[in-house]
Amino acid sequence: MGHWAGYLSHFQTQALSNINNINYNNYNNYNNYNKNNYNNENTMTNKSINVLQFICSTGFYGAERWILALAKHLDKKQVRCDLAITLEENSQDLELVKQYQEKCGETFEIPMAGRFDLSVINKLVKLIKDRNIDIIHTHGYKSDILGIIAAKKAGIKSIVTPHGFENAEDIKLRTFIWLGCKSMKYATKVVPLSKQLCDDSRKHRVKEHQLVYIQNGVDLSEVEEQRLLPLQKQADEKRIGFVGQMISRKNIFDILEIFETLCLKHHNLKLILLGDGDQRAELETYANKMKFADKIEFLGFRDDRLELLQNFDLFVMTSSLEGIPRCLMEATAMKIPVAAYDIAGIDQLITHEQSGLLAKYGDKETLSQYWEKLLFEPDYAEELTNNARDYVNQHYSAQRMANEYTELFNAMMEEK
């Protein structure tokens, strides 16, 4: 433990020193990075603003889908939006790269040696120079640290978008999250997804002149296309579903416990869990010991997630911490009834007894009653889902979000 603590102390000092003490003239030819569909544009004149989305991704979750929604709806005449993504040992087929290439633009894969690799900074600087990047836009604690340092070295502006602050138990992960939070105050702008995340950013000493609130948006066109297709499910079966990362702050053990309680009363229930993450193996082991283990399915990542979502009779969340969850937006747009804990972020999408049912955090007994009410009172559930769908379509358009980001990019370029 002492050896690890010493390493962390050294790493913290080195990373923060990198941010504070940048030699802007120290630009050399760094290691090559892997490129997809790359064309050198050093000699080209381009009147558009060149933005680099940067994420250290190990799956295809809300942040990855958010990047796709933003890039897809940006006006390409005004903004050229590239994607840089780190290649790590546990990367999940890089679905983001595939979809980004198809729908949005060019992608660049940067190898990362180990869980955290400071050599990525120099590779990012080279990419920034080669692609004439004006603004780097980072997502997640690792990409925030690496991206902000790279921006300082390259002499460009940076945006950090917090998608949520993890309350991890692992000491190594907590340290990197702490560094990511510390690095935010060195960004040009910090643009949280929710008002609660704005408040959280202030706690990390982000100044008011850095903060810009752009309400979250999501591309709901694919959801609407799927919603209009015929249902494919057994009429006598009630399917309860979750979509998201299987990590501690999602608190999925509460979902399993509530499900087991309801199964004692109703024998036609099924629980479908979509997603992956650090806790999946532990959750599966726990579920396999439950009395109704045969009614629980862990499906991992699925390309047909919207089809599976359409067949849910209830969408559930028991998170302790959220931004504004994309999966919840998709569920409401699909007209799936929602029952969840009443926490910041979720309360911006769901109003209790108007567009869903919310229980006090940790109140599993009340949440169980809400599951039951929405599953077995279809008229009431339909009233709430109509309201929820209308609300998300009106307030959380991806095009509105992209327009506001374009305004921000232009304003940043005008600032000295």
Image (cartoon, rainbow, N blue to C red):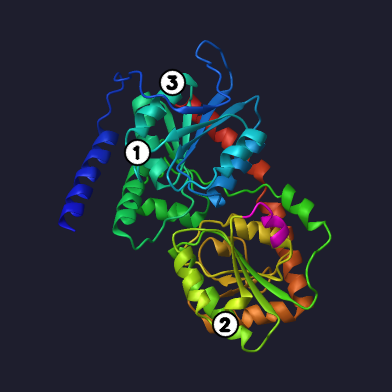
Q: Amino acid at mark 1?
A: Tyr
Tell me the tag on residue 129.
3
Q: Earlier in the sequence, mark 2 or mark 3?
A: 3
**Crowdedness of circle 2 by 10 Å Cα count: few (<14), some, many (20+)?**
many
Mark 2 vs mark 3, foreground winner is 2
What amino acid is found at the position of numbered circle 2 in the picture? Answer: Glu
Dot 3 alpha-carbon crowd within 10 angstroms: few under 14, some 14 to 19, many 20 or more: some
Residue at the (46%, 54%) spot, across then down: 164
Work out whether mark 3 precedes mark 1 in sequence or the reverse, and give the earlier one.
Answer: 3
Looking at the figure, which quarter contains the N terminus? bottom left
* Residue under pointer 1: 186
Seen in the picture, residue 44 relative to 171 is either above or below; the reply is above
Within 10 Å of disc 1 (Cα), the crowding (few <14, some 14-19, many 20+) is many
Is residue 205 placed above or below 314 in the rendered structure?
above
Where does residue 170 sit, x and y in percent of width and height?
Answer: 33, 60
Disc 3 marks which amino acid? Lys
Q: Is residue 393 magenta?
A: no
Q: Which residues are magenta?
A: 302-308
> Which residue is labeled 2 in the image?
260
From the viewer's perspective, tell me whether residue 367 is left or right of residue 125: right
Q: Going 75% across and 77% down the picture, which residue do you hit?
A: 380
Residue for point 57% across, 16% down = 46
